[in-house]
Amino acid sequence: MASSRACSLLSVITLSLILTTTDASSRSLPTPHKTTVLDVVSSLQQTQHILSLDTTLSSLTTTTTTIPERSDPVFLNSSSPLSLELHSRDTLVASQHKDYKSLVLSRLDRDSSRVAGIFTKIRFAVEGIDRSDLKPVYNDETLYRPEDLTTPVVSGASQGSGEYFSRIGVGTPAKEMFMVLDTGSDINWIQCQPCSDCYQQSDPVFDPASSSTFKSLSCSAPQCGSLEVSACRSDKCLYQVSYGDGSFTVGDYATDTVTFGTNGKVNDVALGCGHDNEGLFTGAAGLLGLGGGALSMTNQIKATSFSYCLVDRDSGKSSSLDFNSVRVGAGDATAPLLHNSKIDTFYYVGLSGFSVGGQQVSLPSSVFAVDASGGGGVILDCGTAVTRLQTQAYNSLRDAFVKLTANLKRGTSSISLFDTCYDFSSLSTVKVPTVAFHFTGGKSIDLPAKNYLIPVDDAGTFCFAFAPTSSSLSIIGNVQQQGTRITYDLANNLIGLSANQC
């Protein structure tokens, strides 16, 4: 009897210990988080490739500059599809940098100037500064005197120096030239002869006298009246665009025929013919404005949609810019395309938040909203490189990422824009937490690891490629857009995002 009670007691104690141990073990296991793989070796190989890319052997610099005459269709409606090849800046402009870190610093310097320009342009719109305050001043005894422009000179400051290019033809017969692609600008412009001061470009500078379809616009033309900064001389409309880094273009505002490769042409496109141009536009002949304003290329050709896929800037590859031909697919992530009543240039997107490792980041619902004054919100911009987030949103995202990467070796970087870096010098691949954008409407898209962990040198230092801003405006930049086809469905006010569609 005593023996039986002892065995029973022992069984109870053993079972209790098993249950206790099992319960403790289950509590100590961390909740698994969603991960993806960063290919460290491939990223570092591309840093070497882009520095050694010989642009003189590239087809980009050997393309015939005159398009033969032929009876191409004239696109006068909103349904005509057309497509242009899209290239990154570093495949056009030969690198002058001794190492990859200096290239990164150069990119980020341009990036900071652009972001400052965007913030200034939107702030002026929100504060209601009238364009009459931005009139250029010229001297009748000189051709153009940009140094005499009245302050504040910020029209077009959002345009930046350009990171992606397409090749189009201007004039009759058409002369092909590289143009900066810019969703943050409305004004199309090219450098023109005679040059008071022109920067170096890869194609011959356009001579308006060689085009039978070139026409100067009068001061009473509606296109002239739509410019933010304009002036009049001998009844010819003058335009001026200036930039956050001090770059500018000044010249005649005119119309000419624009040819899109073998797709066809559009007559009477308004564009600036710049005779005095200075700044960081090396390589490109001018700028192709794809913003939402009345003078942008998208509005002038009456496009119902356009899309692009930005290849990795270090890859040396190309993709396409398409009008009216790419539709938002059923499997795409979608987001509302929003409008700011104070400024029509920029494309606002309905962003609700993020997740890291599959876990939602806690944020106030108002953090990405456009307020009653027109401030705040989130814009998509192909010319900004690194995504800028309102400070509270950035801190929450970064902290969530750091929490799930405690096992990774932290690195140091002298680049002040980035505060979270890692040392992957001894790794060929590494598992990292996923980062996803969540949009209003319930859809989301996971970013590839290389879109948020980028090399900042060739030694294996990778940084978390987001940055905080004290502005209430957030900007989704091209580093996060790379490898994703972005479709702007203008007719239905919808943004579509298709991963791996370059």
Image: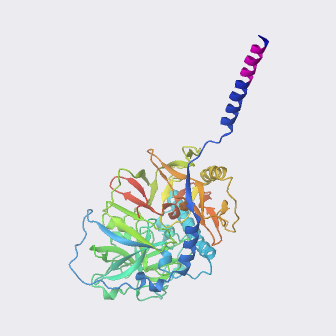
Single out the residue that lies furthest toward the top: 1
Q: Position of residue 442 (x, y in %)?
A: 45, 44
**Left or right: 226 as drawn, with respect to 481:** left
Q: Is residue 136 visible?
A: no
Locate residue 319: give its quadrant.
Answer: bottom left
Single out the residue that lies furthest toward the left: 71
Figure check: 449 above or below 336: below
Colouring style: rainbow
Residue 10 shown in magenta: yes
Residue 305 shown in magenta: no
* Magenta residues, start to end: 3-13
**Left or right: 2 as drawn, with respect to 482:** right
Name the residue rendered at 73%, 28% in the picture.
Answer: 17
Magenta part mainly helix, strand or loop?
helix
The foreground one among 119 and 65 is 65
Q: How many numbered markers are drawn?
A: 0
Q: Position of residue 184 (x, y in %)?
A: 46, 65
The foreground one among 279 and 73 is 73
Q: Position of residue 127 (x, y in %)?
A: 53, 58
- The quadrant of the rendering that contains the C terminus is bottom left
**Left or right: 429 as drawn, with respect to 339:** right
Figure check: 49 above or below 299: below
- The quadrant of the rendering that contains the N terminus is top right
Name the residue rendered at 32%, 85% in the picture.
Answer: 66
Q: Position of residue 114 (x, y in %)?
A: 54, 68
**Left or right: 156 as drawn, with respect to 102:** left
Name the residue rendered at 57%, 76% in the picture.
Answer: 48
Q: Is residue 229 visible?
A: yes
The foreground one among 134 and 250 is 250
Figure check: 338 above or below 74: above
Figure check: 166 above or below 62: above
